[in-house]
Image (tube, rainbow, N blue to C red):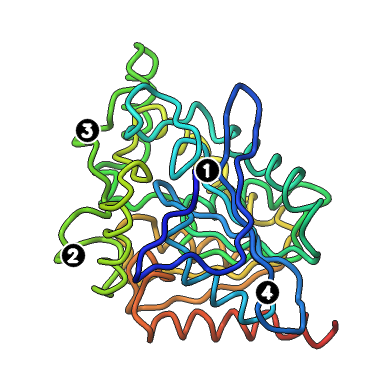
């Protein structure tokens, strides 16, 4: 599937795109770009959150290329332009988060390592950050650093609607009786990005919100509705792993974590608690941001990019 261009969201020039063939017939849509300014500083591997798509990050791609980075990105299985796994393509489904680990593995081995210049820096949002953290304790990481925007270390209580233990029991029981493909309570085919701007949980920036909405109105096949019971069960199982007290102590890759002060989708407290237990990492709270920090106002984004630049300044000086 080609990248979708709009007048207000043009495809960054020079894109290389394709479909990556994985196991069991899964196909992942990917794109990569070379930097637009010297000196070349390596490659940022950009990983999105649940229900997102490459087009939503065109502005971020341009920001990174201006900083001298090549960019490589993909759509996770089950969303964007990648393979959907159920007859109803709007349902957010995954059997296990280990399947996302496989997406990451194939993307790195078959797209990034052969064709993209090191060093490799991981940059991820929400669920993408969760998947990167699952891999941050493994020996021989591909990444020299990870920069994570509102990583889904835990789901916000107001999003779950119940304590995590109760939500997990609900998901385990329903999945156990064969209802894995059913939407979670209150779920529907409608993507969250199509909700009215007023009262939305994603951003305080109306223009960027409308831009992302226009992409889905133009290309509705990129959208994704609510999670299924299977996705919720898989997420809560993986969250139990990341929120174990000893897990942050095993992380070997240097991390920069961003938390949003007005986040109602993932737990800001969980991000801060995780960061405080890291041996190699730090975090920054942006009080005036909602969940999607990189889709926020210019003021919020400037804070993000200032911290990003400062964090990587030592790498640039050593190069």
Residue 131 percent coordinates (x, y): 58, 47
Compute the Cα span from label 4 to label 2: 33 Å
Q: Quadrant of residue 27?
A: top right
> Which of labels 2 and 3 is toward the front?
2
Front residue of this view, candidates 26 and 127: 26
Q: Are the residues at dot 2 and dot 3 in contact (C-beta closer than 8 Å)?
A: no
Q: Which mark is residue 126?
A: none
Compute the Cα span from label 4 to label 3: 44 Å
Q: Residue at x 60, y 40 (%)?
A: 19
Q: Residue at x 74, y 63 (%)?
A: 120
Q: Are the residues at dot 3 and dot 1 in contact (C-beta closer than 8 Å)?
A: no
* Residue that numbered label 4 is attached to: 35
Label 4 sits on a secondary structure element that is: loop
Front residue of this view, candidates 204 and 152: 204
Compute the Cα span from label 2 to label 3: 23 Å
* Residue that numbered label 2 is attached to: 197
> Which of labels 3 and 1 is toward the front?
1
* Residue that numbered label 1 is attached to: 76
């Amino acid at each position: 599937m080609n990248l979708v261009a709009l007048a207000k969201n043009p495809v960054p020039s020079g894109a290389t795109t394709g479909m990556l063939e994985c196991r069991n017939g899964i196909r992942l849509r990917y794109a990569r770009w070379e930097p637009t300014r010297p000196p070349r500083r390596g490659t940022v591997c950009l990983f999105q959150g649940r229900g997102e798509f490459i087009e939503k990050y065109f502005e971020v791609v341009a920001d990174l290329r201006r900083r001298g980075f090549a960019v490589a990105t993909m759509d996770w299985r089950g969303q964007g332009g990648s393979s959907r796994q159920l007859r109803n393509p709007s349902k957010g489904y995954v059997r296990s988060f280990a399947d996302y680990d496989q997406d990451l593995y194939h993307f790195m081995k078959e797209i990034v390592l052969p064709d993209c210049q090191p060093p490799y820096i991981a940059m991820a949002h929400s669920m993408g950050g969760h998947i990167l953290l699952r891999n941050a304790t493994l020996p021989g990481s591909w990444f020299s650093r990870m920069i994570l925007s509102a990583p889904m270390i835990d789901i916000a209580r107001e999003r779950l609607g119940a304590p995590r233990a109760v939500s997990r029991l609900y998901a385990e029981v329903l999945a156990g009786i064969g209802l894995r493909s059913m939407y979670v309570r209150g779920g529907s085919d409608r993507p969250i990005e199509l909700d009215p701007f007023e009262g939305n949980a994603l951003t305080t920036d109306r223009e960027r919100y409308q831009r992302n909405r226009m992409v889905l109105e133009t290309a509705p096949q990129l959208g994704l509705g609510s999670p299924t019971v299977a996705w919720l069960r898989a997420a809560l199982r993986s969250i139990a792993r990341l929120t174990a007290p000893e897990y942050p102590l095993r992380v070997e890759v240097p991390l920069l974590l961003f938390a949003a002060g007005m986040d109602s989708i993932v737990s800001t407290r969980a991000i801060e608690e995780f960061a405080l237990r890291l041996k190699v990492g730090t975090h920054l709270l942006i009080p005036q941001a909602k969940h999607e920090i990189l889709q926020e106002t210019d003021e919020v984004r400037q804070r993000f990019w200032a911290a990003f630049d400062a964090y990587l300044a030592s790498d640039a000086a050593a190069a």
